[in-house]
Amino acid sequence: MITHPPGLHAFTLVAALLPSLSASHAAAQSHIDLSKLPPPANQPGLAYASDIKPIFDTSCVRCHGAEKPKAGLRLDNLADALKGAGKTRVILPGNSAQSPLVHSIAHLGPEDHFMPPPGNKAGIPRLTAEQIGLVRAWIDQGAK
Ligand code: HEC
């Protein structure tokens, strides 16, 4: 005489917990979701020498200094940083969102371009969102 109700509410619960599928964002560069970039810092007057070089010195120059720079890219001085890697400019002054260096440090796009390379032997950790925001704002301000 005792009837068991079907497991209706369990089913409803599972259905409610299913993640909704969001449409992928169309980014300018198709494989890069620019919405995932940390926002530029809200700090005026940023300069390579005072604000950016310390970050690059700590996290990049071991591999992008004067001696055998990886990908031919030196980040230990402003002129060479702006020249880029071989023929490829990696900093586009005024446009941090499209700058390949920003995609690399934000770990967006192809994994072999993530910088510093994950698991590097030197044990250099990735930049914080705050540091990426500073680099972005500096580039947006003209990379001076
Ligand atoms: C442990 C070594 C190492 C460190 C540290 C490092 N890089 Fe690199 N970087 C490389 C290598 C190796 C390449 C070449 C990768 C390739 O061509 O696939 C490279 C290439 C690049 C390139 C060229 C395009 C690309 O993404 O491949 C950029 C831009 C770059 N690095 C930026 C940085 C920045 C900015 C930092 C510091 C936040 C940094 N790298 C730290 C090893 C390093």
Image: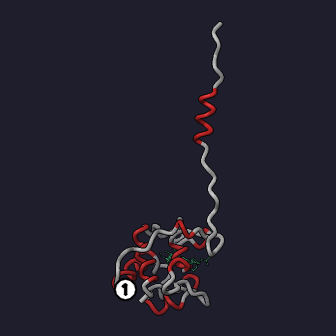
- State which quarter of the image contains the C terminus: bottom left
Where's residue 42, x and y in %? 37, 74
Colour style of the rendered protein structure: secondary structure
Instruction: Please identify the quarter of the rendering in which residue 128 is found.
Output: bottom left
Where's residue 43, x and y in %? 35, 77
> Residue at (62%, 56%) from the top-left corner?
22
Q: Nearer the viewer, residue 63 or 11?
A: 11
Q: Residue furthest bottom?
A: 79
Q: Amino acid at mark 1?
A: Ala
Q: Nearer the viewer, residue 58 or 111?
A: 111
**Residue under label 1:** 47
> Residue at (58%, 83%) from the top-left corner?
71
Q: Is residue 81 above or below residue 42?
A: below
> Residue at (49%, 87%) from the top-left corner?
93
Q: Residue furthest top?
A: 1
Q: Quadrant of ligand 1?
A: bottom right
Q: Secondary structure at mark 1?
A: loop
Q: Is residue 75 above or below residue 31?
A: below
Total tally of numbered discs in the picture: 1
Question: Left or right of 101: which side holds 15?
Answer: right
Q: Nearer the viewer, residue 37 or 10?
A: 10
Instruction: Please identify the quarter of the rendering in which residue 17 is found.
Output: top right
Whether label 1 lies within 8 Å of ligand 1 gets the answer no
Where's residue 21, x and y in %? 63, 52
Q: Residues within 10 Å of mark 1 (few under 14, many from 20)?
A: some
- State which quarter of the image contains the N terminus: top right
